[in-house]
Structures are given as structure tokens and as C-alpha cells.
Image (cartoon, helix red, strand yellow):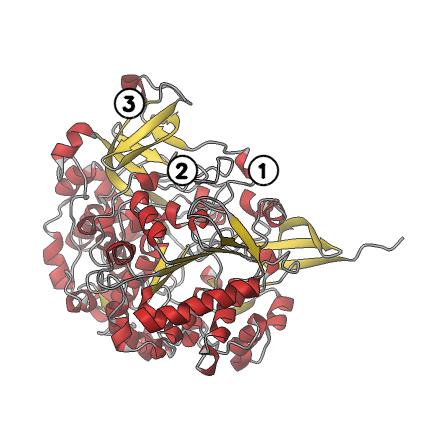
Amino acid sequence: MNEKKTTVKKALCYFCHARCGAMITVEDGKAVRIEGNKDGLSRGFLCPKGRAAIEHLYHPERLNYVHKRVGERGENKWQQIPYDQALDEIAEYLRKMKQEYGAEAMVTSHGTFRTNREWIEFAWLHLFGCPNFLNDGIICYCNTQSIGYASQGWFCLFAGSCIPGETKCIIQWGHNPAMSYPMEMANTLRAQSKGAKLIVVDPRLSDTASRADLWLQIRPATDAALGLGMINVIINEQLYNKGFVDQWTVGFDQLKERVQEYPPEKVAEITRIPKEKIIEAARIYATNTPGIIAWGVALDQIGRNSTQTLRCQNILRGLAGNLDVRGGEYMGFTGDMRSVIQKGDLECTEYLSPEQRRKQLGAGRFKLQAFPGWELMAGPYERVWGHKFPAYPLTHANPMYVWDAILHEKPYPVKALFCIANNALLSRANTKRVYKALKALDLLVVVDYWMTPTALLADYVMPAADWMERYDLDDMCGGAIGSVLLPSDRCVEPLFDRHTDYEFWQGLALRLGLDDKAFPWKMSFEEICNYRLKPIGITFRDVLDKGYILFPREYKKYEKAGFATPSGKVELYSSVMETLGYDPLPHYEEPAESHIRTPEVAKEYPLILTTSPRILEFYHSEQRQIRSLRSRHPDPLVQIHPTVGEKEGIEEGDWIYIETQRGRIRMRAQLNPTLMEDVVVTEHSWWFPEEPAEEPFLHGLWISNPNVLTVDDLDDCDQACGGWTNRGLLCKVYKVEKY
């Protein structure tokens, strides 16, 4: 009897952003076992999603072949065709569309960094002449990056294994790493055990908040007021780093004047956080340096106060002198990896003409997270870092403008939408409007692992290879040790007719003649990785053999070339914001819906709705099919205070309706006495693969999807970046009598 051929492959788990290392045992070409890589940066950790990766790989409901629509949209009637035939037909449509309407009549829509190939998609778009890239990043970290670039020429990121041992204070603000990034939680607790102070800002007593030295229970979406109040205390009590502020910031006097409008007493009234706790938080942060403020997605989702809160965070970092110091905020993969060809160097942005850039949907209104802001920040970035300023993730079309262009052809027609690892019906505000837009398209192409509700409306559904079926090379922050290049091996050959998204864009590029320009489309992805690594004399295989390549961290890089801002300093008063026509200093606004701003709405909808906290078993709308994960978390849950339950006759586990002005959904009730009495917290991205696929069901799209409740009115969005409100709306709840 022949012995089985057994190998062990090193890969990165791509089921969230943490990129934990995995070891996959492969027998005769089939993955049979997965465990954490103890020699990797994640030190052998894998969450339940990662441990279920083999179940994901071989799941019987995975998409394996191209599905071409033959019935009406939503009828779930398909024809199976070869992958190359689908590319031929899609390319022919794009060729004709471009001739008749222009390249801007196409939009691509991406999930949150699901495949690590968005920069390749950008190269394709720019060479094709299209300025319209949609991404959930305007409510998930990309706006954080833009605001960071505007404030200090870089963004600060702490996730995964990125908390240095020297850190003395950690603020987890709108972030619950116990659920979203367990490795970060472990490092947070490790730092706390060494004496670091932990401050948590969250309306709920989350798992992370329960471990805090100071928990700030905030009224949802009032975070900008808290930030301004903390700045007020730090400045007025002269707790700031005077040497750093004097030498490396601009706008201190203007900032000092502005924050006098936000004394702790006023901020306490706005946020419901006691005045004493606001003062205590400011003193702890300012006097326990170096410190960090960890990124939390909640702040990207609070509508009009999002940019203002993130500006406050960057100002706090500058006032404390916590930027690019040992144990403080990490400043730059690029700064450590100057010798490697960066992703932004290959995006071909120079091939997208200024005329086409001006056609980017929404860029005339939401300028910071679009080409107008990008153009202002590109020069300082390239001066300091010596690489092209990346367009991804900093240049987004706005989804509300995209739906208008599809439905009303304003300001011009959009005819084709490509959803790449993106379940748009679950991830974008106002699901009813998104649904109407998708139904109205001439061409909808979906590249995904599953037949999602969005895929059910497509003309072509293209099967995607997952992370065990592809090669990858990622660059990540390694905390105190520096930056790292992390490779991921292909563990098994792509099954059936699954392809990587690089092969998707490469196939279209070669068919449309984009290969005679700047991007090396005829290379394999591994060859592109080798091209990026050539300046340092190694290959992708070398990195794979080593496990990762470390680029030691440099501290205080700004002392050599300044900060990558127009002034070369940390801009407390932002010249970028001012040039774009926005307030150059942070301020607070009432949320789009509140008892104060919209009291007439509050009469019928008296509760404050916040959506989208992470669930350990799922990543956004993914993994609902995975039995081992779904058995741990079978139903969508909504948290309410027991007093609300008593008033409405709701008991633990009851199905209840959550209703806003825009619609209603149902979830199972959890009674949470740690909530403010008028706060309601729903999970997000729920659909039910077990429900019928055909219209009107669409795999249970309408049952428990919180974006049925959210608003996409332009006036209610963040005015600089265009993000909508997922947290801080008004709602009511009541029991479902029959289910």
C-alpha cells in the first residue's frame, strides 16, 4: 500500500484583519488539519473562525463554478458556464459600455480588506479609466487612515500583536478586542499586568470594559464631545508634552481657544459620563506616557461626529507626545520598509487623468476620503516616505451617490457594478435603496465564496478561491519589534473552477488590452511578489521559508524629514481640512437622530439604537453556513435593558421587533443590566442561508438585517468622509407575539 504524501503548509488566516498564522497539514493534496503557527507573530493562536477554515474550504455550499443568470434577477435560475467564457462576455460588455458611456459608468465594490488584492484592483481601474471604487472602509478604518494622514502624515494602528511592552496607557475606544481581535486583547491584558492603565469607552460593559481601570459609559455617537473635553483638561491643566507641542505641532493656540467651549461640565451633560471620570481619563492618559489609543470601528460608524472624534484622537496623541516613540503610537509600515516596492507604487494612479478623477462619485462633497483630499496629501507623503501615495484605501466613491447614478443617472449613468468579496445588501446603509439599485443595473458581477443575497441578484457569479487556495504577501505592523512582511502559502490547488481575484482582474486586463501599460499583468501573482522584493534581494519563496521578514522599527523618524503633512508637523489645526472647506479644528454635533436634535422622532422612537458590535464566530456577513460556528451562535441577538423588557413584556430569549422610521427587523432578546436604560444594541450582517434563495426571500435578507433600519441621507453622513450612521439612531422595541 502506498503511503500518503504529507506536507505542512504555513499560511495566514484571512477571516479577519489580524492575519493569525496557521499550519495546515495536507495529505495527498487535501487539507486535513489546521492549528496555529506557534513560531508566528500570533504565537499559535487561532480563533473559532480560523479553526473552521477546512470546513469552509470543502463546504458543499461553496461556489465552485460560474453561474450565469438565465431568469429574472432574484429568480435563482442559472446556467453553469466556463470561467474563461464568463470573462470573455464581461470584457465585451465593458468594451461597449466604455465606448457609449465612458469608463466611469462602472463601479467596483469591495468588502473590508478581504483578499489583500485591492491595490491590484486599483491598478486595473486606473488603467481602464474608472475613478469609482466603493468600499466599506468609509465606515471601517479607511476614514481613520485619511484623517491620520491629514493630521500627522500617517495613521496609527494597533491590532493583533501590536501593543509594545513599554506602553503605560491603553485607550480602547469603541473597540472590544475580546471579540474582534483576541490576540490584541491578550496583549492588552499583558500590558495591564505590567502596570499599564486601561481606559475603555463603550456604551456597554463589554468583555474588554469589564477589565478596565476606568470605564467611560458614553451615550452613543457623542464621542467627539468626550475627545474635546479630554483635550480641554489636558491643555488647561498643562498636562501636555510642552517640548513636543512647541517643536512639532502647529495650531495649538487656536485649539486651546476652541476647547474652552467644551468644559467637563458641558461634556458630561452631552455624553452622560460624569465630569469626574472625564477629568480622570484625561489625567491618566496625559500622565502615563507612552500610551496608545487603539483603533475601534465604532468611531467610523457614528455619522456626523466620526471625523471630529478621530481628529480629537490624533490631537490627543500629539499633545501627549506619543507619536513614534518606544511604547507609543506606531508610525508607518512604509517608514520601516522603504526598500520594498510598495503596493501604492503599483496602483498606476498617474494613468487616471485629472478629468476622470473629478468624475469620482461623491468627491465634490465628501472630499477627504476621495481624490481631492488624496491630491493634497500625496505631495507631503512622497516627500517624507519616498514612495507613491496609495490610492487604496484613501479614494472612495460614495455609495449614496452611486445608487443615485444607477437609479436616476445623476450626475451620469452607472451601468455596471462589480462586487468583490462584498455582500452589499448586508453591508451598506438603507438596504431597500441598495436593493432597488442592484435590480436596476445592466450588469452585476459578484466574486464570492457563497451564493449570498447580493449574489442572487447578479448576472454573473464568479467562484472565488479562499486563503488556503492562494499565495499572499502581507505587510503588517509588528508593534515594538518593527514592521513585518508576512507570506502565506497556497495549501491546496484551487478546487473546481475557483480563481483568485488577481486572476479575475488579470483575465479582464489581458482581454481589454490593459497589458501594454504600466502594470505587469502577464506575471503570476508570485512573480509580482518577487518583483516587489527584488530591491532587497530576496524572493517570495525566501520569505516563505523564513516565516516572515522583520524590518526593525525606527523611532522618531520625523526628526529626519518631518511629518508628512503640508507643514511638516502634527497639525492640530488642519490645513488639509481648511483647504477642502471643512472646519480645521474639531467640534461636536448632535447625532443625526437624538432626543435633542429630533425630539418629534423621539416621541415615537424613544430608544437609542447602536448596531454592529463584532461577533467572535462570524466576520461581518460571513460564516453563517459553517455548522461548527453557527451551532455556537445560532440566532441574531439584541441587547436591551431589563427595565425596557419589563415595560414591553419581553423576557430573555424572546423574539422581538426593532423598529426605526425606515423599517423593522426581529432578533432574540438579551437582557443586559449594564446598558443605559434607553440603549439598544443589535448584532449586524445577519442573513440565513437555510432560508429560500428565490425572491422575495433572498436567504432571509429582510428578517434580521440592521441596515434595513439605518439611514443614508447625505446630511446625516460624516461631512468629510461620507460615512453613514450605524450607531446612535432612534428606535423602539416590542415583542413578536407569534413567530
Give the structural element (helix, strand or loop) at label 3: helix
Residue designated by label 3: 644
Q: Nearer the viewer, mark 3 or mark 1?
A: 1
Mark 1 and mark 2 lie on one chain; the one further toward the N terminus is 1
Residue drawn where x is 60% and y is 56% of the image: 468
Mark 3 and mark 2 lie on one chain; the one further toward the N terminus is 3
Residue designated by label 1: 628
Q: Nearer the viewer, mark 3 or mark 2?
A: 2
Mark 3 and mark 1 lie on one chain; the one further toward the N terminus is 1
The residue lying furthest to the front in this view is: 71
247 to 279, vertically: above or below: below
Viewer can see residue 47: no
**Residue contact between numbered discs 1 and 2, judged by CB atoms under 8 Å:** no
Q: Return the x and y of residue 440 as percentages of the image width and height.
A: 33, 52
Give the structural element (helix, strand or loop) at label 2: loop
Residue type marked 1: Ser
The crowding category of the residue bearing disc 1, from other C-alpha atoms within 10 Å (few below 14, some 14 to 19, many at least 20), is some
* Frontmost residue, 29 versus 505: 505
Q: Return the x and y of residue 563 as percentages of the image width and height.
A: 29, 72
381 to 329, vertically: above or below: below
Gap between marks 1 and 2 measured at Cα:
28 Å
Residue designated by label 2: 696
